[in-house]
Image (cartoon, rainbow, N blue to C red):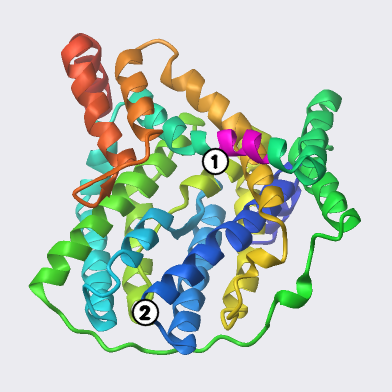
Amino acid sequence: MPVKLTAIARDINAQASWAGLTAFVWYAFGAVPVHIAVAGQLGLTSAQSSSWIFIIWTTGAVASIGLSLYYRIPVPITWSIPGLIFLGTLSGKFTFPEIVAANLVAGMIILVLGVSGVSGRIMKWLPLPIVMGMFAGSIFGYVTRLVSVTVEDVLIAGPTVAGYLLGRLIGNPRIPPVGLAVIFGAAAVLATRRAVPEAMSWSLPALAVPGMEFSASAVAAISLPLVVLTLGLGNVQGLGFLIAQGYKVPVNPISIVVGVNSVVNAFLGGHPASVARTGVAIMAGPDAGPAPKRYWATLVGAALTMIIASAAGLVIPIIAVLPPSYIFALAGLAIFSSLQDAFEKAFGVNLRFGALVAFMVAMTPFALVGITSALWSVVAGLAASLIAERPELKAAWSAGLD
């Protein structure tokens, strides 16, 4: 054990540490406010909201640290923002006990799919170029938003971008571009006095065990879409990106952990867990350092998210602490190299037509029968390849099933 701990300590590097910090900033100021808003839509009490926030971030942090240390690959486990937004649309249609029960059923389905090995077989049937086309389309909005906020708020986003470009110009692994972006942007926020930490209210989390009310209509309307969103968006995109980075990904064990987390989350009012697709883009991309050491980004990010869990009693949207332009610019810069890598793998050699169709569908925001465009993009990409690239698609399937 001492030898193993020494080896882990030797893998600490600045690029991974900055990537982990960046992911935490995105989680805290990009994801948590959405959660608070949805909790308000559902009319939850402060205790219910606090319990929900506490459990999903705690289980996610523990799972991320455990998986990343055991497999030495960056595996960020959090939850799906599209899934959360979907729950917000159910306000007035189902009671909170019905939603909680449906969350539990969804977690159990995810767990069964992982234990049975179905999750692994799903990944084998999805060709990498189409998955990367979907992934690129799904995160493309972060980059276009980066451009928009830079134009709209040049005093904050401008220095953030300048720091990133300076890091790319220097080209020294010890001075990661994202790290300079964080520092330059933070300096701009302080210089313009745009940070208002007094807007935050800190309190210990409350743990509220909610009642559950099982109904067939809630399971059909809530559980099944959540399973699709979890597996189709988080797991497929997140794990697909890890595979594209050259990692040997244990799909079924990770899927089982996601299922276990989802079940545990439900007992304290939380919704299903998921592989963090944005977190993967930030912490497993080229800017996160040497591939064998990128798991440290997840360790740093997960450890910091425990701050979110311990501050689950926050009742005022903490997005007021930092200007949105800083958060959006930082998120866009953090995944820039991951987007470039996704483009290269999607449109490299094979199945380029299917990958292009998947990209276009994924980057177009719409929902059909409650399922967002990212999942439909896989269906469209496979259909396009089946029509125009059938020999290549059959070859990809054969290779995946070998």
Q: Which mark is residue 131?
A: none
Please identify the quadrant where the C terminus is shown.
Answer: top left
Could you give the CA–CA distance between mark 1 and mark 2, rounded to whole angstroms?
28 Å
> Would you place residue 284 above or below residue 346 in this image?
below
Q: Secondary structure at mark 2?
A: loop
In the image as oriented, which residue stretches furthest toward the right?
191
Who is closer to the viewer here, 391 or 118?
391
Could you tell me if residue 239 is visible in this image?
yes
Of label 1 and label 2, which has the lower sequence position? 2
Callout 1, which amino acid?
A: Ala
Residue drawn at (61%, 79%) of the image:
310
Residue 203: percent from left, percent from top: 64, 87
> Would you identify the image quadrant in which residue 321 lies?
bottom right
Q: Is residue 211 left or right of residue 342?
A: left
**Residue denoted by label 2:** 269
Is-magenta flag for residue 151? no
- Given residues 139 and 152, the one toward you in this image is 152
Q: Residues within 10 Å of mark 1 (few under 14, many from 20)?
A: many
Please report the bounds of the magenta region as a residue range: 142-149
In the image, is 218 to the left or to the right of 114? left
Residue 155: horizontal and vertical position, in percent? 82, 44
Name the kind of residue labelled 2 in the image. Answer: Gly
Say the numbered circle drawn on residue 281: 1
The foreground one among 327 and 272 is: 327
Residue at the image position 37 percent from the left and 79 percent from the top: 269
Say above or below: 391 vs 399.
Answer: above
Q: Residue at x 60, y 48 (%)?
A: 295
